[in-house]
Amino acid sequence: QVQLVESGGGLVQPGGSLRLSCVASGSIFRINDMGWYRQAPGKQRELVARITSDGSTNYAGSVKGRFTASRDNAKNTVYLQMNSLKPEHTAVYYCNVRATNDFLEYSYWGQGTQVTVSS
């Protein structure tokens, strides 16, 4: 079993920054992709950013140049640096990790962390 613990969410004014963190722990043979999704009220969950085990990244078009995903493989941790935040970035942000155990790949989700951008 794999547990994901997210942190770093909160209330920030427009134009501000936040850094989200997600630590994976438990029975892990190998972590593959790590990423962040978000779900705003009344909307479906959507991809924000993903980062592969070798550091390649993929971003939603709306956050390119504004958000940066990174990871520390030694700490089983993925980060999301969010700059120049806008009210439309308000959502619950979820960490997602794809990990291999017993030769099978599983997808794990964090509990979510609220990000609110408001003056």
Image: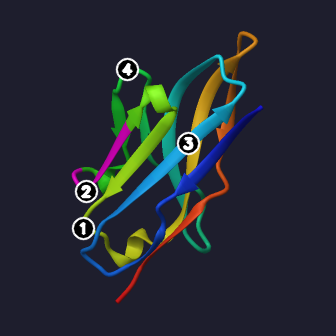
Check the picture and name the quadrant holding the C terminus: bottom left
Instruction: Give whichever of discs 4 and 2 has the lower sequence position.
Output: 4
Q: Residue at x 76, y 12 (%)?
A: 102
Element assignment for label 3: strand
Distance between the alpha carbons at the discs numbered 3 and 4 = 18 Å
Q: On the image, numbered disc 2 is attached to which residue?
A: 66
> Within the image, what quadrant is residue 62 found in?
bottom left
Q: Main secondary structure of the magenta part?
A: strand
Residue 31: give x, y in percent of width and height.
56, 24
Q: On the image, numbered disc 3 is attached to which residue?
A: 23
Residue 83: give x, y in percent of width and height.
26, 62
Instruction: Give whichever of discs 2 and 1 has the lower sequence position.
Output: 2
Q: Disc number at residue 84?
A: 1
Q: On the image, numbered disc 4 is attached to which residue?
A: 54
Distance between the alpha carbons at the discs numbered 4 and 1 = 27 Å
> Within the image, what quadrant is residue 66 found in?
bottom left
Span of residues in magenta = 65-70
Residue 92: give x, y in percent of width and height.
56, 65
